[in-house]
């Protein structure tokens, strides 16, 4: 399979990429384009690709993968691309109709942290909200239906108005007394 492909994608967890590379780098990879899909690691994980005549890249989709069916949503996703000689894969990226931006390898960890902030911390905020609503005697079966419109509305505002113009409520109004009541009422969630 490796010998018959010009483009090779390694889509394993980050901690497996280098060992998988070790097992395939002894094949004749001259002229082949090797990709991994890590958001944090750079193409340097393919440390001697250039020496053996292969081209190495990282191609990371900004999307929260929770199962194997998530690929269905990739048509609307922005990808980061990193590696040497990006012009070498430009026709592939264009043919695949990917929306992408080039990222400097020194910014990969920071970029991935930003992705984790938005995809995982929104879930953490939902969990905090759930716990507070349960303390307010909301039935657990209503929690998702209660918080989803708030979250969806906030995301829609971000899409339509931009990040900075999407805040609502007492923060925007400068209603410090309401904010103080919030802080006093949630106690150990501070």
Image (cartoon, rainbow, N blue to C red):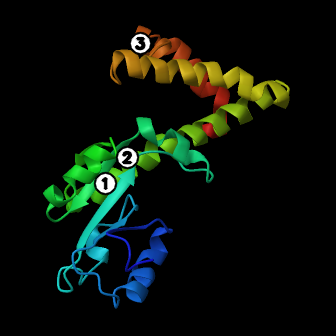
Closer to the camera in the image, 35 or 107: 35
As displayed, is residue 178 above or below residue 131? above
Distance from the alpha carbon under mark 3 to that under mark 1 = 29 Å
Closer to the camera in the image, 132 or 4: 4
Q: Position of residue 94 (x, y in %)?
A: 26, 44
| N-terminal-most mark, 3 or 1 | 1
On screen, residue 46 versus residue 113, left or right, reads left
Res 63 label: none
On screen, residue 50 versus residue 137, left or right, reads left
| N-terminal-most mark, 3 or 2 | 2
On screen, residue 133 versus residue 41, left or right, reads right
- Which secondary structure, mark 1? helix
- Which secondary structure, mark 2? helix
Res 114 label: 2
Quickly name the residue at label 3.
172
Quickly name the residue at label 1.
110
On screen, residue 135 versus residue 9, left or right, reads right
Circle 1 Cα neighbour tier, 10 Å, few/some/many (<14 / 14–19 / ≥20)? few
Name the residue: 53% across, 17% down.
Answer: 153
Circle 2 Cα neighbour tier, 10 Å, few/some/many (<14 / 14–19 / ≥20)? few
Name the residue: 46% across, 42% down.
Answer: 74
Q: Nearer the viewer, mark 3 or mark 1?
A: 1
Distance from the alpha carbon under mark 1 to that under mark 2 = 6 Å
- Which secondary structure, mark 3? helix
Distance from the alpha carbon under mark 3 to that under mark 2 = 24 Å
């Amino acid at each position: 399979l490796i010998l018959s492909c010009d483009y090779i994608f390694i889509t394993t967890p980050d901690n497996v990429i280098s060992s998988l590379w070790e097992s395939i780098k002894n094949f004749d990879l001259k002229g082949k384009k090797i990709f991994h899909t890590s958001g944090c690691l750079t193409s340097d994980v393919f440390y001697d690709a250039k020496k053996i005549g292969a081209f190495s890249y990282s191609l990371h989709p900004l999307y929260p993968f929770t199962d194997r069916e998530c690929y269905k949503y990739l048509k609307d996703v922005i990808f980061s691309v990193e590696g040497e000689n990006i012009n070498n894969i430009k026709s592939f990226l264009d043919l695949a109709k990917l929306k992408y931006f080039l990222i400097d390898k020194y910014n990969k960890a920071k970029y991935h942290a930003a992705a984790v902030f938005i995809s995982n911390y929104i879930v953490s905020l939902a969990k905090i909200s759930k716990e507070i609503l349960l303390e307010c005697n909301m039935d657990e079966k209503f929690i998702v239906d209660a918080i989803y419109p708030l979250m969806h509305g906030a995301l829609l505002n971000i899409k339509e108005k931009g990040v900075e113009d999407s805040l609502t409520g007492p923060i925007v109004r400068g209603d410090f007394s309401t904010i103080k009541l919030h802080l006093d009422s949630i106690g150990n969630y501070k």
